[in-house]
Image: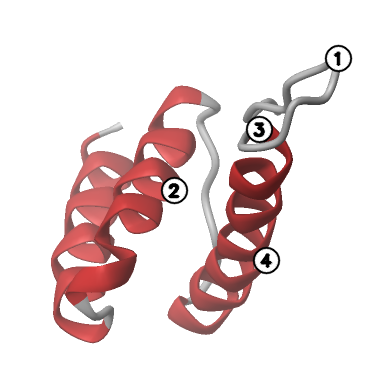
Amino acid sequence: MFKMNFFILLLQFLSFNFVNSSSYNSQELFNNYIVKYNKSYSSLNEYYYIYKVFNKKIKRINYVNSNNYSYKLGINK
């Protein structure tokens, strides 16, 4: 458990240095998603690949939710 928590903190620290401030909200959401759904990644390359996919989906969620559709999108497992 300690190793996983340390790894998550390390990823948060590293991601803070690699991601520009305009994408901080999606980075914070991604880190919360990792913790909430107990996700883990075997390498930083995998982490950043999944983050890019997540970020793209967040943009889609924000776009859809900013329109007057009869439904709203959100983050789930």
Residue at the location (47% across, 36% down)? Answer: 33
Residue to which mark 4 is pinned = 53
Q: Secondary structure at mark 3?
A: helix
Q: Amino acid at mark 3?
A: Asn
Q: Amino acid at mark 4?
A: Val
Q: Earlier in the sequence, mark 3 or mark 2?
A: 2
Bin the neighbour count of mark 2 within 10 Å (Cα to Cα): few under 14, some 14-19, many 20 and up: many
Which label lies toward us, 3 or 2? 3
Q: Earlier in the sequence, mark 4 or mark 1?
A: 4
Spatial separation of the CA atoms under disc 4 and disc 3:
18 Å
Residue to which mark 1 is pinned = 70
Residue at the location (17% across, 70% down)? Answer: 16
Spatial separation of the CA atoms under disc 1 and disc 2:
26 Å
Bin the neighbour count of mark 1 within 10 Å (Cα to Cα): few under 14, some 14-19, many 20 and up: few
Residue to which mark 2 is pinned = 30
Q: Secondary structure at mark 1?
A: loop
Q: Earlier in the sequence, mark 4 or mark 3?
A: 4
- Compared with 62, 76 (above or below) is above
Q: Is residue 49 left or right of residue 19?
A: right
Q: Looking at the picture, tell me which residue is in the foreground, 19 or 70.
A: 70
CB contact under 8 Å: marks 3 and 1? no
The image shows a total of numbered marks equal to 4
Bin the neighbour count of mark 3 within 10 Å (Cα to Cα): few under 14, some 14-19, many 20 and up: some
Spatial separation of the CA atoms under disc 4 and disc 1:
25 Å
Residue to which mark 3 is pinned = 65
Q: Amino acid at mark 1?
A: Ser
Q: Earlier in the sequence, mark 3 or mark 1?
A: 3
CB contact under 8 Å: marks 3 and 2? no
Q: Position of residue 40 (x, y in %)?
A: 52, 49
